[in-house]
Image (tube, rainbow, N blue to C red):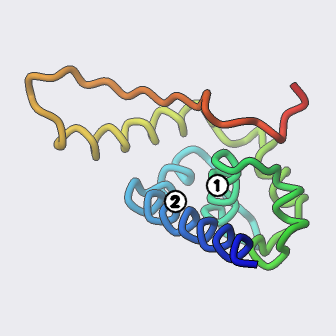
Amino acid sequence: MSIVTHNHHSCELLSLKISRFLEEVHVEQILKACNAYKVRGFSVKDVFQVAFENAFSSKSFFQKQRESSTSIPFAKDTFYRFMDSSSINWRKFTLQLSSAVIQKIEPLTNERRRNVLIIDDSLFRRARAKR
């Protein structure tokens, strides 16, 4: 029973850290600038946060929703419609998000060092993919 509690606690901690990161780099403003919006229902930030958390978990959206329906307040149609939206400029979003991250990291490095940002996701197993 303690394993389940620990796993739930680590998921909440991950969610809290991701939420703090998204607020710090102003993801909601970046999403708005990239034409990501919701006409009604849940906010774009909430849907994107679930998608972002999904990238760092070993479970698919469907598995997470089936496991605990209270942690994800919207239906799968909302999630998939958001991810498949052709009106969102994802390339512009990626560039603006990486620029915001670099602006946060740059003051932490020494001036004599080269500025490089490498994101390697090879350690994460993709259980949600067929191949």
Q: Nearer the viewer, residue 61 or 26?
A: 61
Local SS, label 2: helix
Q: Position of residue 16 (x, y in %)?
A: 52, 69
Q: Quadrant of residue 12?
A: bottom right
Q: Is residue 114 left or right of residue 90?
A: left
Q: Is residue 117 left or right of residue 115?
A: right
Q: Residues within 10 Å of mark 2 (few under 14, many from 20)?
A: some
Q: Disc 2 marks which residue?
A: 18
Placement of 34 over or under 27, stated as above or below:
above
Q: Disc 1 marks which residue?
A: 53
Q: Is residue 16 left or right of residue 111?
A: right
Placement of 106 over or under 26, stated as above or below:
above
Report the residue at 42% width, 26% height from top. Answer: 118
Q: Is residue 97 left or right of residue 42?
A: left
The N terminus, quarter of image: bottom right
Report the residue at 76% width, 36% height from top. Answer: 126
Q: Position of residue 30 (x, y in %)?
A: 49, 50
Q: Position of residue 86 (x, y in %)?
A: 77, 38
Q: Nearer the viewer, residue 24 or 71?
A: 71
Residues under labels 1 and 2: Cα distance? Answer: 7 Å
Report the residue at 81% width, 42% height from top. Answer: 84
Mark 1: which amino acid? Glu
Residue 26 numbered tag: none
Q: Residues within 10 Å of mark 1 (few under 14, many from 20)?
A: some
The C terminus, quarter of image: top right
Report the residue at 55% width, 54% height from top. Answer: 32
Mark 2: which amino acid? Ile
Q: Earlier in the sequence, mark 1 or mark 2?
A: 2
**Dot 1 and dot 2 residues touching (CB under 8 Å):** yes
